[in-house]
Image (spheres, rainbow, N blue to C red):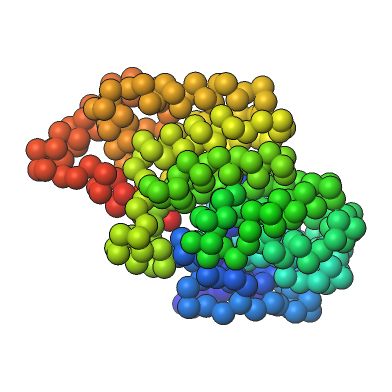
Amino acid sequence: MAVRKPAYEQGPIRPPSEAHSLLLRLTRNCPWNKCLFCPIYKGEKFSRRSVDEIKEDIAAIADAVDKIKTISHKQGFNGVVNSSVFDLVQNRFPEYISVAFWLYHGGENVFLQDGDGLRLSREQLQTILKFLNEKIPGITRITTYARSKSILRYSVEDLSKLKNAGLSRIHVGLESGNDRVLEFMNKGVSAAEHVEAGQRVVKAGISLSEYVLIGLGGRNLWREHALDTAKVLNEINPDFIRVRTLAVHPVAPLYEAVQQGTFIPLDDDTAVKEELLLIEHLDNINSHFFSDHVLNLLEEVNGRFPEEKEHMINLIRTYLSYPDREREIFRLGRRMGYFRQLKDLSDIRRRSAVEEIYEQLRQNGMDMDRYIAELMLRFI
């Protein structure tokens, strides 16, 4: 029997913080798609979906919501989507599974895909946001990715109107605040433009999440990358700073530069030192700092500025104070999924399993940095 496909379109990506959000596709792919470090959308063309197409998807989603809640009522759960209802939908109505998943996790948040939701006009976005809230009541947060260049197409007044229409948060790939790094990576934006775009979002009252790529400066520019990125973030004062650690996928254009030796990636320890330098120079901000990605070595470095700054600094310094062997064991265990926090090193069962693998790799003459880098590619 043929698999029944959803009557609405979804793209391939969303931020980790939007894992439980409903995905509504406004555009396909990325309007820039030239960043050297990015392996996504290669060979794909950018396009905008029409307002009518998007409205049809919203109507289809609203219809799915009604049908799933009817199933819940028939099962005696008063419209609540619990695990029993979710399992039933998954087995009998797979075309509704993404909506059922969303309802199971509260049915409140929506993420507008793909790589840049602000490539539509303000009027188009206002129409879509209004229709979305009318057709699907109870939505409390609507977010989207946007490039800084795209944000600069909107005035503060325009952005304020989008906020009033329901746009809650914008996710921006800052990546770096250093112009040499931005130029080398072909990001298509300057540090000054990042600052101006970020400040407009903040002034409009829209929540702003800025993403930083640890390691993007490589061995030659890691200090400049950290210091200038801190400077840009200090000027913006975003609601959220989210760090990711660079891993170079063979599909990404940056991979060729690595092979040619024109870009030398950081080892884990230097990447952690870069993160420490970044945090040390973040001042006079009220941002939440998150390491919410599996590629980050120290996932537990999270906190609010300024009150938890020293706590984050001390966590990183604790790791860097470990002997070489201890750091290598933690790195290996982290990348293999045994460890998530430094305290996991004290878990005898998990540590023993990692130490056994570690000693086998050492005996076989394995280059530990290379092996760990290959492990990281699984998570891109």
At x 45% / y 48%, what residue is drawn?
221
At x 44% / y 23%, what residue is drawn?
317
Q: Note whether residue 51 is visible.
A: yes
x, y percent for residue 285: 71, 33
x, y percent for residue 146: 68, 60
Using residue 145 as the reference point, say whether residue 280 is left or right of it.
Answer: left
Above or below: residue 302 compared with residue 169: above
Using residue 123 as the reference point, say whether residue 307 is left or right of it.
Answer: left
Using residue 210 as the reference point, say whether residue 120 is left or right of it.
Answer: right
Above or below: residue 134 compared with residue 309: below
User: In terms of depth relative to the viewer, which is nearer, 48 or 64?
Assistant: 48
Q: Note whether residue 170 is visible.
A: no
User: In terms of depth relative to the viewer, which is nearer, 236 or 116?
Assistant: 236
**How many dots with numbers?**
0
User: In terms of depth relative to the viewer, which is nearer, 74 or 192?
Assistant: 192
x, y percent for residue 124: 83, 72
Above or below: residue 43 compared with residue 308: below
At x 75% / y 61%, what residue is drawn?
151
In the rendered image, the quadrant that contains the C terminus is bottom left
At x 69% / y 64%, what residue is drawn?
149
x, y percent for residue 370: 25, 49
User: In terms of depth relative to the viewer, which is nearer, 73 or 122?
Assistant: 122
